[in-house]
Image (cartoon, helix red, strand yellow):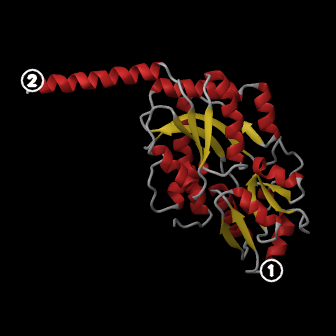
Amino acid sequence: MLLKSLRTLAVALMAGFAATASAQNYPSKPIRVIVPFAVGSGTDIVTRMVTEDMSKTLGVNFVIENKPGASGQIAAEALVAAEPDGYTIMMTTNTAHSANPHLFKKLRYDPLKDTTPIAKVISFVFVLAVKADSPVKNAQELIARVKANPGKLSYGYGNSTGQVAGAHFAKVAGLDVAPVAYKSTPPAMTDIGGGQIEFMFVDVAASQAFVRSNKLKMIGLQSDQRSPLFPDLPPVGEVTPGFNFNVWGGLIGPAKLPANVVTTLNAAANKALTNPAIREKLIASGLEPVPTTVEDFRKFVVEQHAAWGKSIRAAGIEAE
């Protein structure tokens, strides 16, 4: 019995030493970054920009793995199932982290208990978009058009922000309009260009290519106040107030991620976000870089969990 106990202790100690050595050498191989939305989405764009700089800082490659679908649930489930060794992380957003617990009755992950906050990265600017050749020029004209065609028009969304904003807009304006869910924002924007849906709330980063190719036009800012990034774009909240959603993205890992891994990744992310060249690219894409400490990000995700629950209930959305 004593010999067996000593062997068990020896195995445990060796495993502990190996884990410590591995942690001290972190990172020593490529890091997988799960993205919950499709290539070309705003989340995908910011992930590639920031991890490219992080790769230079840490001396390893960051491999982007897009796992769109189910409002970020597929990606989140893949993350929480991964080993907490720092070689699988995720660029989460308010969709997967703040909104899903209030939009779905059952989740196979708990965003607060099953993940480790690493670094807040970005705040997204969202806009109200319609087809480029649509006759409407602002939110008031869109409301009038939808009311003139009750039950005939629809809006799309590819994430929780678009879903909650669309539902809030329809409720406050008293619109008879149908919501249409998409796996991600790019296919929804394609359908706006094709006339299958009438409008959507979408992040500027994802919509820019469609705007430049004359498929979409932005007619309002998803906010109650004007933005210094788009001073000439009128806030939709001037017509339908209540757009106080905090739209954000940040890096997380599985639960029980070693502290030194967290601090290493946080420092590399913050370095990227304070790089003038990276900041300029992000801001030009309607993305506001927001470097934070690990502790501030931990507090933030808890606060946003409660805030998004309040916004979802106010929009009249029932959990599925």
Residue at position x 71%, y 57% in the image: 185
Query: Is residue 136 visible from the viewing direction of this image?
Result: yes
Q: Is residue 65 above or below residue 9?
A: below
Viewer-closest of 153 and 40: 40
Which residue in the protein does label 2 denote? Answer: 2
- Work out whether residue 221 or residue 244 is closer to the camera in this orientation and state it: 221
Instruction: Answer left or right for 34 relative to 173.
Output: left
On the rendered image, what quadrant is the N terminus found in?
top left
Question: Hey, what amino acid is under mark 1?
Answer: Asn
Q: Residue 264, position in %: x, y?
A: 55, 24
Q: Residue 303, percent across and down?
A: 54, 44
Q: Residue 148 placed where, x, y %?
A: 83, 79
SS of the residue at dot 1? loop
Q: Is residue 22 left or right of residue 117?
A: left
- Residue located at (16% from left, 22% from top): 6
Residue ID at (52%, 58%): 102
Describe the element under mark 2 as helix, strand or loop.
helix
Name the residue tied to disc 1.
Answer: 149
Q: Is residue 290 above or below residue 3?
A: below
